[in-house]
Image (spheres, helix red, strand yellow):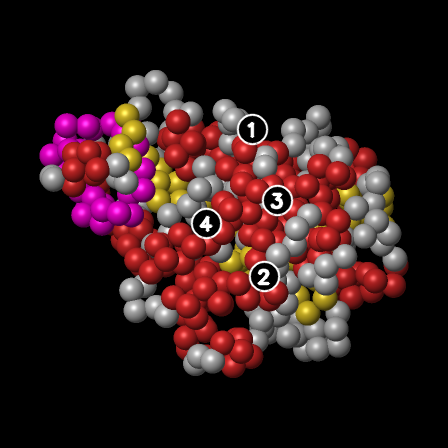
């Protein structure tokens, strides 16, 4: 695991040929600093959480950038909002030059505002997540995502050409542990539990408290732990507000904070071109399965398999894997869920330049035809390229003329 090149490294190199500045954003401890360590020689890296580096940049950002006109990476840039107007001036002084600056940062209102306002049109943004299954396990052939991005590939082509990575034991270990690099590097259960505790504590007490100083920290910490039990559900925010003893607007703010800091992924309801009454509540997941299992106090894989939230955390892991792999490739996409008042459901509806694809996710090894009735109707009623049923079946197989059944290991 140590020294492993992240899949986003290729995207970073590509964006450096397209944009004057590249921003790498994501949660703390997901590997942004390590990604910078893989840059070619000649790049200078300044970490704004190191006192000497912060002083060198913050004393006079305009002068600093004049003295360092290119091949400079600035880590944790959100800690210095004054940097961004100076970056805009420096970039505009030689607008045609690409690959001059890299900035990284954990989510914050200042960072998001700076990228959309000060650096609009001048920056390529890469969202870096914790390790994906595709990074933990190498592949010996095309994955489902590789084939999905080829517009000529059909469901039949998927079944015939996709290759699995790793084995089921390795996949369930990844599901249980999640993707944060540090626990993978140390590979020690005691360290993992302690690291997760400290991560959540630092997230609430440091990052969120700093960004939102008026926040009730105890209420938000309780909310953050509740998210593991809410994963995989269509969320009724009024019910969450009652459980927490806070107002609905406060819970709405909590969800926005959790999503903006990469803790939670919200999937809005797919409501386009629907002929049935649909449930319009958003559905969501904790974005890292390891954090969710830690919040649920699940001790190991054996206990996880019998846990009532097992299906939901599995579903969330698969949704996140698909989104992470698309982000690693720089593929723009929108993700939704679909559920009718009658109970028909599609776990993930994903749309991009590759088309519209419906995805059903199962933890078990057997997929019964009666379980897919609503899924088949959705694929038939909408302009889907094909449907994917992802489960733990041993081999890919064609479930219908336009529906492929694939092991999750094929992602």
Mark 1, residue position? 1
Quarter the C terminus occupies:
top right
Residue 260 is at least partly visible in this image: yes
Picture quadrant where residue 15 is located? top left
Q: Regarding mark 3 in the picture, which secondary structure is present there?
A: helix
Q: Earlier in the sequence, mark 2 or mark 4?
A: 4
Q: Are marks 1 and 4 in contact (CB under 8 Å)?
A: no
Query: Between marks 4 and 3, how big is the CA–CA gap?
Result: 14 Å
Q: Residues within 10 Å of mark 3 (few under 14, many from 20)?
A: many
Question: In the rendered structure, does residue 305 fall within the stretch colored magenta?
Answer: no
Query: Between marks 1 and 3, how big is the CA–CA gap?
Result: 14 Å
Tell me the number on the disc at residue 199. 4
Residue under the point 82% across and 61% down: 372
- Residue bounds of the magenta highlight: 61-86
Mark 3, residue position? 177
User: On the rendered structure, is 328 left or right of 396?
Assistant: left
Query: Between marks 1 and 4, how big is the CA–CA gap?
Result: 20 Å
User: In this rendering, is residue 33 above or below 207?
Assistant: above
Q: Residues within 10 Å of mark 1 (few under 14, many from 20)?
A: few
Query: Between marks 2 and 4, how big is the CA–CA gap?
Result: 15 Å
User: On the rendered structure, is 270 left or right of 170?
Assistant: left
Mark 2, residue position? 228
């Amino acid at each position: 695991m140590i020294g492993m090149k992240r899949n986003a490294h290729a995207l970073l190199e590509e964006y450096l040929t397209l944009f004057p500045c590249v921003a790498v954003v994501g949660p703390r401890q997901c590997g942004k600093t390590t990604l910078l360590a893989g840059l070619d020689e000649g790049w200078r890296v300044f970490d704004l959480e190191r006192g000497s580096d912060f002083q060198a940049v913050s004393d006079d950002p305009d002068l600093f950038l004049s003295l360092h006109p290119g091949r400079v990476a600035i880590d944790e840039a959100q800690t210095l909002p004054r940097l961004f107007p100076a970056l805009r001036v420096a970039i505009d002084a030689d607008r045609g030059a690409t690959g001059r600056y890299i900035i990284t940062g954990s989510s914050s209102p200042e960072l998001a505002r700076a990228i959309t306002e000060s650096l609009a049109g001048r920056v390529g943004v890469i969202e870096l997540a914790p390790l994906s299954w595709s990074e933990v396990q190498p592949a010996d052939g095309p994955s489902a995502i590789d084939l999905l991005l080829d517009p000529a590939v059909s469901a039949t082509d998927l079944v015939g050409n996709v290759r699995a990575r790793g084995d089921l034991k390795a996949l369930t270990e990844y599901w249980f542990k999640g993707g944060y690099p540090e626990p993978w590097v140390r590979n020690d259960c005691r360290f993992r539990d302690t690291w997760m505790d400290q991560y959540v504590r630092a997230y609430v007490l440091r990052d969120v408290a700093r960004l939102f100083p008026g926040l009730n920290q105890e209420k938000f910490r309780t909310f953050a732990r509740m998210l593991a039990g809410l994963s995989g559900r269509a969320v009724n925010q009024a019910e969450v507000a009652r459980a927490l003893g806070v107002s609905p607007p406060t819970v709405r703010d909590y969800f926005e904070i959790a999503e903006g800091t990469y803790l939670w992924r919200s999937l809005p309801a797919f409501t386009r071109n629907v002929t049935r009454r649909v449930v319009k509540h958003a559905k969501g997941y904790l974005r890292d399965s390891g954090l969710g299992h830690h919040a649920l106090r699940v001790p190991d894989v054996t206990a996880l398999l019998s846990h009532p939230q097992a299906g939901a955390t599995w579903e969330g892991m698969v949704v996140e894997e698909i989104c992470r792999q698309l982000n690693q490739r720089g593929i723009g996409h929108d993700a939704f869920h679909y559920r009718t008042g009658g109970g028909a459901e599609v776990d993930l509806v994903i749309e991009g330049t590759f088309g519209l694809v419906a995805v059903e996710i199962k933890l078990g090894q057997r997929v019964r035809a009666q379980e897919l009735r609503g899924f088949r109707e959705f694929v038939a009623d909408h302009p889907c390229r094909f449907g994917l049923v992802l489960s733990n079946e041993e081999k890919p197989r064609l479930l219908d003329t336009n529906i492929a059944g694939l092991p999750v290991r094929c992602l």
